[in-house]
Image: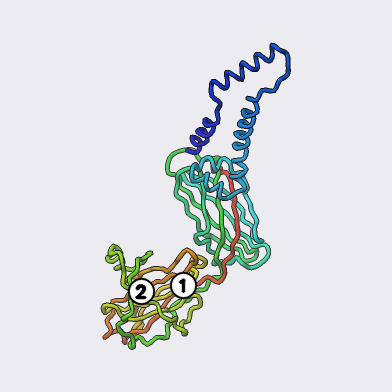
Amino acid sequence: MFKRKYKHMINQVHPSDELLSAVLKSAHDNSKKKNIITSSFFRPLTAITAICICMFLTIPVLAATVEPVYQLIYVVSPSIAQFFIPVQESDEDNGIKMEVISAYIHDNAAEIYITMQDLTEDRIDDSIDLYDSCSINRPFGSTATCQGVGYDEKTKTATFLISITEWGKQKIAGDKITFSVKGFLSHKKNYSDVKIPADLSLLTNRESTQKVHTTGGGGKDYEKYKDEGEFTVLTPSEAMTEFPVDGIDLTAMGYIDDKLHIQIAIKDHLKNDNHGFFFLKDSNGNTVDYNYSISFSNHNEQSDGIDYCEFVFDVSQKEIGNYSLYGNFVTSGMITEGNWRVTFPLKQDNN
Protein backbone atom coordinates (compact mmCIF):
# COMPACT_ATOMS: atom_id res chain seq x y z
CA MET A 1 0.00 0.00 0.00
CA PHE A 2 2.84 2.37 0.90
CA LYS A 3 4.58 1.74 -2.43
CA ARG A 4 1.32 2.24 -4.37
CA LYS A 5 0.69 5.59 -2.66
CA TYR A 6 4.09 6.98 -3.58
CA LYS A 7 3.86 5.61 -7.09
CA HIS A 8 0.55 7.40 -7.43
CA MET A 9 2.12 10.64 -6.17
CA ILE A 10 4.91 10.40 -8.72
CA ASN A 11 2.42 9.73 -11.52
CA GLN A 12 0.66 12.96 -10.62
CA VAL A 13 3.79 15.01 -11.35
CA HIS A 14 4.80 13.12 -14.51
CA PRO A 15 4.81 15.49 -17.55
CA SER A 16 2.28 14.87 -20.30
CA ASP A 17 3.22 13.37 -23.67
CA GLU A 18 2.57 16.74 -25.36
CA LEU A 19 4.98 18.44 -22.99
CA LEU A 20 7.67 15.82 -23.60
CA SER A 21 7.26 16.17 -27.38
CA ALA A 22 7.59 19.92 -27.17
CA VAL A 23 10.72 19.63 -25.06
CA LEU A 24 12.33 17.18 -27.50
CA LYS A 25 11.42 19.30 -30.49
CA SER A 26 12.86 22.40 -28.81
CA ALA A 27 16.08 20.59 -28.04
CA HIS A 28 16.32 19.35 -31.62
CA ASP A 29 15.77 22.85 -33.04
CA ASN A 30 18.28 24.37 -30.68
CA SER A 31 20.97 21.91 -31.75
CA LYS A 32 20.45 22.97 -35.35
CA LYS A 33 20.80 26.66 -34.51
CA LYS A 34 23.90 25.96 -32.41
CA ASN A 35 22.66 28.60 -30.00
CA ILE A 36 22.59 27.99 -26.25
CA ILE A 37 19.06 28.82 -25.17
CA THR A 38 17.58 27.71 -21.86
CA SER A 39 14.10 26.32 -22.41
CA SER A 40 11.45 27.31 -19.88
CA PHE A 41 10.19 23.74 -19.96
CA PHE A 42 13.33 22.43 -18.19
CA ARG A 43 12.81 24.53 -15.08
CA PRO A 44 9.58 22.84 -13.90
CA LEU A 45 10.88 19.46 -14.97
CA THR A 46 14.08 19.98 -12.99
CA ALA A 47 12.14 21.19 -9.97
CA ILE A 48 9.74 18.24 -10.14
CA THR A 49 12.60 15.78 -10.45
CA ALA A 50 14.41 17.40 -7.53
CA ILE A 51 11.28 17.22 -5.38
CA CYS A 52 10.83 13.53 -6.15
CA ILE A 53 14.49 12.76 -5.41
CA CYS A 54 14.39 14.73 -2.16
CA MET A 55 11.18 12.98 -1.14
CA PHE A 56 12.68 9.52 -1.56
CA LEU A 57 15.98 10.50 0.04
CA THR A 58 14.16 12.08 3.00
CA ILE A 59 11.90 9.12 3.82
CA PRO A 60 14.64 6.90 5.29
CA VAL A 61 16.11 9.85 7.20
CA LEU A 62 12.74 10.75 8.70
CA ALA A 63 11.97 7.12 9.46
CA ALA A 64 15.22 6.81 11.36
CA THR A 65 15.11 10.09 13.28
CA VAL A 66 11.47 11.18 13.62
CA GLU A 67 9.43 8.75 15.72
CA PRO A 68 5.95 9.78 14.44
CA VAL A 69 7.11 9.33 10.83
CA TYR A 70 8.56 5.91 11.61
CA GLN A 71 5.37 4.81 13.38
CA LEU A 72 3.22 6.08 10.50
CA ILE A 73 5.29 4.20 7.94
CA TYR A 74 5.19 1.10 10.17
CA VAL A 75 1.39 1.20 10.27
CA VAL A 76 1.24 1.48 6.47
CA SER A 77 3.97 -1.04 5.70
CA PRO A 78 6.01 -2.76 8.44
CA SER A 79 8.47 -4.21 5.93
CA ILE A 80 9.31 -0.79 4.45
CA ALA A 81 9.61 0.82 7.88
CA GLN A 82 12.01 -1.87 9.08
CA PHE A 83 14.00 -1.64 5.83
CA PHE A 84 14.60 2.09 6.36
CA ILE A 85 15.49 1.93 10.06
CA PRO A 86 19.26 1.52 10.63
CA VAL A 87 20.81 -1.13 12.84
CA GLN A 88 21.52 0.20 16.34
CA GLU A 89 22.08 -2.48 18.95
CA SER A 90 22.47 -0.18 21.97
CA ASP A 91 20.88 3.07 23.07
CA GLU A 92 21.39 5.35 26.07
CA ASP A 93 19.00 7.90 27.52
CA ASN A 94 18.56 9.48 30.95
CA GLY A 95 21.64 7.66 32.24
CA ILE A 96 20.25 4.22 31.38
CA LYS A 97 21.63 1.97 28.65
CA MET A 98 19.60 -0.59 26.71
CA GLU A 99 21.52 -3.18 24.70
CA VAL A 100 20.88 -6.27 22.59
CA ILE A 101 22.84 -9.25 23.89
CA SER A 102 21.73 -11.92 21.40
CA ALA A 103 19.06 -12.46 18.74
CA TYR A 104 18.77 -15.94 17.25
CA ILE A 105 16.16 -17.94 15.34
CA HIS A 106 15.19 -21.48 16.32
CA ASP A 107 12.88 -22.98 13.67
CA ASN A 108 10.02 -20.44 13.41
CA ALA A 109 10.75 -18.79 16.78
CA ALA A 110 13.18 -16.01 17.66
CA GLU A 111 14.69 -15.43 21.08
CA ILE A 112 16.17 -12.03 21.85
CA TYR A 113 17.91 -11.10 25.08
CA ILE A 114 18.04 -7.39 25.94
CA THR A 115 19.51 -5.69 29.01
CA MET A 116 18.79 -2.37 30.71
CA GLN A 117 21.51 -0.96 32.97
CA ASP A 118 21.41 2.10 35.21
CA LEU A 119 24.76 3.85 34.71
CA THR A 120 24.29 6.72 37.16
CA GLU A 121 21.68 6.03 39.83
CA ASP A 122 19.67 3.26 41.53
CA ARG A 123 16.45 3.22 39.50
CA ILE A 124 16.61 -0.40 38.29
CA ASP A 125 16.03 -3.28 40.71
CA ASP A 126 14.67 -6.82 40.65
CA SER A 127 11.07 -5.55 40.58
CA ILE A 128 11.50 -3.65 37.29
CA ASP A 129 8.40 -3.77 35.09
CA LEU A 130 8.23 -2.40 31.54
CA TYR A 131 4.46 -2.23 32.03
CA ASP A 132 2.71 -1.11 28.78
CA SER A 133 5.52 1.16 27.58
CA CYS A 134 7.42 -1.24 25.32
CA SER A 135 6.76 -2.10 21.69
CA ILE A 136 8.14 -4.81 19.38
CA ASN A 137 8.11 -3.92 15.67
CA ARG A 138 8.90 -6.53 13.03
CA PRO A 139 8.31 -6.83 9.26
CA PHE A 140 6.43 -10.15 9.40
CA GLY A 141 3.28 -11.51 11.02
CA SER A 142 3.94 -13.03 14.43
CA THR A 143 3.14 -13.12 18.11
CA ALA A 144 5.59 -11.52 20.52
CA THR A 145 6.07 -11.31 24.28
CA CYS A 146 8.58 -9.70 26.62
CA GLN A 147 9.38 -10.83 30.15
CA GLY A 148 12.03 -10.17 32.76
CA VAL A 149 14.38 -13.11 33.32
CA GLY A 150 17.14 -11.81 35.57
CA TYR A 151 18.71 -9.00 37.57
CA ASP A 152 22.34 -8.39 38.54
CA GLU A 153 22.42 -6.24 41.67
CA LYS A 154 26.15 -5.53 41.37
CA THR A 155 25.92 -3.97 37.91
CA LYS A 156 22.30 -2.75 38.27
CA THR A 157 21.40 -4.63 35.11
CA ALA A 158 18.06 -6.23 34.29
CA THR A 159 17.71 -8.81 31.50
CA PHE A 160 14.58 -9.33 29.39
CA LEU A 161 13.66 -12.13 27.00
CA ILE A 162 11.69 -11.24 23.86
CA SER A 163 10.04 -14.30 22.30
CA ILE A 164 8.67 -14.04 18.76
CA THR A 165 6.83 -16.82 16.95
CA GLU A 166 6.44 -16.30 13.20
CA TRP A 167 3.00 -17.16 11.77
CA GLY A 168 4.05 -18.47 8.37
CA LYS A 169 6.94 -20.48 7.05
CA GLN A 170 8.91 -17.63 5.50
CA LYS A 171 12.64 -17.22 6.07
CA ILE A 172 13.05 -14.42 8.58
CA ALA A 173 16.82 -14.62 9.06
CA GLY A 174 18.26 -11.17 8.39
CA ASP A 175 15.00 -9.35 9.05
CA LYS A 176 15.34 -6.43 11.44
CA ILE A 177 13.46 -6.09 14.72
CA THR A 178 12.93 -2.80 16.55
CA PHE A 179 12.37 -2.85 20.31
CA SER A 180 11.53 0.41 22.07
CA VAL A 181 10.78 1.41 25.66
CA LYS A 182 9.24 4.66 26.91
CA GLY A 183 9.53 4.01 30.63
CA PHE A 184 9.51 1.45 33.41
CA LEU A 185 8.36 0.91 36.98
CA SER A 186 10.61 -0.22 39.80
CA HIS A 187 11.04 -0.39 43.58
CA LYS A 188 7.72 -2.15 44.02
CA LYS A 189 6.27 -2.99 47.41
CA ASN A 190 4.32 -6.15 48.17
CA TYR A 191 1.67 -6.20 50.88
CA SER A 192 0.57 -9.76 51.69
CA ASP A 193 -2.18 -10.89 54.03
CA VAL A 194 -2.74 -7.33 55.30
CA LYS A 195 -5.57 -6.92 57.80
CA ILE A 196 -7.83 -3.94 57.07
CA PRO A 197 -8.99 -2.09 60.22
CA ALA A 198 -12.74 -2.14 59.51
CA ASP A 199 -15.66 -3.46 61.58
CA LEU A 200 -17.69 -5.28 58.93
CA SER A 201 -20.62 -5.83 61.33
CA LEU A 202 -21.42 -2.10 61.09
CA LEU A 203 -21.92 -2.15 57.32
CA THR A 204 -25.43 -1.43 56.02
CA ASN A 205 -27.24 -1.05 52.71
CA ARG A 206 -25.81 1.82 50.68
CA GLU A 207 -28.37 4.19 49.23
CA SER A 208 -25.78 6.11 47.23
CA THR A 209 -25.02 3.98 44.15
CA GLN A 210 -24.24 4.59 40.49
CA LYS A 211 -24.44 2.83 37.15
CA VAL A 212 -21.13 2.28 35.35
CA HIS A 213 -19.78 0.56 32.27
CA THR A 214 -17.02 -1.81 33.22
CA THR A 215 -13.51 -1.61 31.78
CA GLY A 216 -12.78 -5.12 32.97
CA GLY A 217 -13.18 -7.46 35.88
CA GLY A 218 -12.57 -10.93 37.23
CA GLY A 219 -13.69 -13.60 39.63
CA LYS A 220 -15.69 -16.78 39.19
CA ASP A 221 -19.02 -14.99 38.59
CA TYR A 222 -17.81 -12.13 36.38
CA GLU A 223 -18.75 -13.90 33.14
CA LYS A 224 -22.37 -14.14 34.34
CA TYR A 225 -22.72 -10.37 34.63
CA LYS A 226 -20.36 -8.76 32.11
CA ASP A 227 -22.83 -8.87 29.19
CA GLU A 228 -25.49 -6.91 31.08
CA GLY A 229 -23.91 -3.65 29.94
CA GLU A 230 -24.09 -1.66 33.17
CA PHE A 231 -23.18 -2.51 36.75
CA THR A 232 -24.58 -0.98 39.91
CA VAL A 233 -21.68 0.02 42.15
CA LEU A 234 -21.04 2.18 45.19
CA THR A 235 -20.65 5.93 44.82
CA PRO A 236 -17.10 6.83 45.91
CA SER A 237 -16.82 8.65 49.22
CA GLU A 238 -13.95 10.04 51.28
CA ALA A 239 -11.00 7.66 51.44
CA MET A 240 -10.43 5.62 54.59
CA THR A 241 -7.62 7.29 56.55
CA GLU A 242 -6.47 4.10 58.29
CA PHE A 243 -5.98 2.12 55.09
CA PRO A 244 -2.49 0.55 55.44
CA VAL A 245 -1.35 0.71 51.78
CA ASP A 246 0.16 3.87 50.26
CA GLY A 247 -0.92 4.49 46.68
CA ILE A 248 -4.31 2.78 47.03
CA ASP A 249 -7.42 4.31 48.63
CA LEU A 250 -10.40 2.48 50.10
CA THR A 251 -13.29 4.72 48.99
CA ALA A 252 -16.50 2.81 49.83
CA MET A 253 -17.94 -0.24 51.59
CA GLY A 254 -21.52 -1.37 51.93
CA TYR A 255 -24.30 -3.65 50.75
CA ILE A 256 -26.19 -3.65 47.46
CA ASP A 257 -28.92 -6.30 47.04
CA ASP A 258 -27.58 -8.23 50.05
CA LYS A 259 -24.08 -8.50 48.56
CA LEU A 260 -21.04 -6.88 50.14
CA HIS A 261 -19.26 -4.33 47.92
CA ILE A 262 -15.77 -3.00 48.72
CA GLN A 263 -14.27 -0.31 46.48
CA ILE A 264 -10.69 0.91 45.99
CA ALA A 265 -9.39 3.84 43.95
CA ILE A 266 -6.03 4.31 42.24
CA LYS A 267 -4.87 7.72 41.00
CA ASP A 268 -2.81 8.10 37.82
CA HIS A 269 -3.06 4.41 37.06
CA LEU A 270 -1.43 4.95 33.66
CA LYS A 271 1.77 5.92 35.53
CA ASN A 272 1.84 3.06 38.01
CA ASP A 273 0.80 -0.55 38.39
CA ASN A 274 -0.80 -0.32 41.82
CA HIS A 275 -3.33 -3.12 42.27
CA GLY A 276 -4.63 -5.68 44.70
CA PHE A 277 -7.66 -7.59 45.96
CA PHE A 278 -9.59 -8.36 49.15
CA PHE A 279 -10.63 -11.57 50.87
CA LEU A 280 -12.43 -12.47 54.11
CA LYS A 281 -11.23 -14.58 57.03
CA ASP A 282 -13.25 -16.17 59.80
CA SER A 283 -12.03 -16.74 63.37
CA ASN A 284 -10.54 -20.10 62.34
CA GLY A 285 -8.48 -18.60 59.52
CA ASN A 286 -10.73 -19.94 56.74
CA THR A 287 -10.87 -17.60 53.75
CA VAL A 288 -13.70 -16.47 51.48
CA ASP A 289 -12.81 -15.03 48.07
CA TYR A 290 -14.78 -12.37 46.24
CA ASN A 291 -17.31 -13.61 43.70
CA TYR A 292 -16.45 -11.02 41.07
CA SER A 293 -14.78 -7.65 40.63
CA ILE A 294 -15.71 -4.65 38.48
CA SER A 295 -13.26 -2.09 37.12
CA PHE A 296 -14.33 1.37 35.95
CA SER A 297 -12.87 4.87 35.70
CA ASN A 298 -13.66 8.58 35.52
CA HIS A 299 -10.99 9.46 32.95
CA ASN A 300 -11.42 12.50 30.74
CA GLU A 301 -9.41 14.27 28.06
CA GLN A 302 -7.79 16.66 30.56
CA SER A 303 -6.66 14.16 33.19
CA ASP A 304 -5.58 10.60 33.78
CA GLY A 305 -8.35 10.56 36.36
CA ILE A 306 -8.98 7.77 38.84
CA ASP A 307 -9.41 4.05 38.26
CA TYR A 308 -11.75 2.13 40.54
CA CYS A 309 -12.13 -1.54 41.30
CA GLU A 310 -15.06 -2.91 43.27
CA PHE A 311 -15.05 -6.40 44.83
CA VAL A 312 -18.34 -8.18 45.45
CA PHE A 313 -18.80 -10.91 48.09
CA ASP A 314 -21.85 -13.15 48.35
CA VAL A 315 -21.96 -12.96 52.16
CA SER A 316 -25.13 -11.68 53.82
CA GLN A 317 -25.32 -8.90 56.42
CA LYS A 318 -26.35 -11.46 59.04
CA GLU A 319 -23.13 -13.43 58.54
CA ILE A 320 -20.59 -10.67 57.81
CA GLY A 321 -19.91 -10.02 61.52
CA ASN A 322 -18.15 -13.39 61.65
CA TYR A 323 -15.44 -12.23 59.25
CA SER A 324 -12.51 -9.84 59.09
CA LEU A 325 -11.27 -8.08 55.96
CA TYR A 326 -7.80 -8.81 54.50
CA GLY A 327 -6.01 -8.01 51.26
CA ASN A 328 -2.96 -8.54 49.05
CA PHE A 329 -1.57 -5.49 47.23
CA VAL A 330 1.33 -4.35 45.05
CA THR A 331 2.42 -0.74 44.58
CA SER A 332 5.07 0.88 42.39
CA GLY A 333 7.58 3.06 44.19
CA MET A 334 9.18 4.74 41.16
CA ILE A 335 8.51 5.49 37.50
CA THR A 336 11.41 6.29 35.16
CA GLU A 337 10.66 7.79 31.76
CA GLY A 338 12.90 7.95 28.73
CA ASN A 339 13.20 6.97 25.09
CA TRP A 340 15.19 3.84 24.31
CA ARG A 341 15.16 2.10 20.92
CA VAL A 342 17.32 -0.64 19.43
CA THR A 343 17.15 -2.21 15.98
CA PHE A 344 18.92 -5.45 15.16
CA PRO A 345 18.89 -8.27 12.56
CA LEU A 346 17.88 -11.82 13.37
CA LYS A 347 20.53 -14.51 12.94
CA GLN A 348 20.07 -18.19 12.32
CA ASP A 349 21.20 -20.38 15.21
CA ASN A 350 23.41 -23.07 13.70
CA ASN A 351 23.78 -25.06 16.92
Report the residue at 35% width, 70% height from top.
293
Question: Picture coordinates of residue 283 (x, y %)?
Answer: 34, 86
Look at mark 1 in the image and give the residue it sits on: 266
109 or 55: nearer the eye?
A: 55
Furthest residue toward top? 32
Question: What kind of residue is marked 1?
Answer: Ile
The kind of residue on which mark 2 rests is: Phe
The image shows residue 325 at horizontal and vertical percentages of 38, 82
Please, which residue is most extreme toward the right here? Answer: 35
Q: Identify residue for label 2.
A: 311
Q: Position of residue 349 (x, y in %)?
A: 54, 43
Q: Is residue 165 left or right of residue 175?
A: left
Lateral position of residue 342 relative to residue 224, left or right: right
Q: Position of residue 288 (x, y in %)?
A: 33, 77
- The residue positioned 60% from the left and 49% from the top of the image is 66
> Closer to the camera, 155 or 189?
189
Which image quadrant: the C terminus?
Answer: top right
Placement of 73 over or under 190, stated as above or below: above
Q: Nearer the viewer, residue 8 or 100?
A: 8
Please tell me whether mark 1 sits on a helix, a strand or a loop. strand
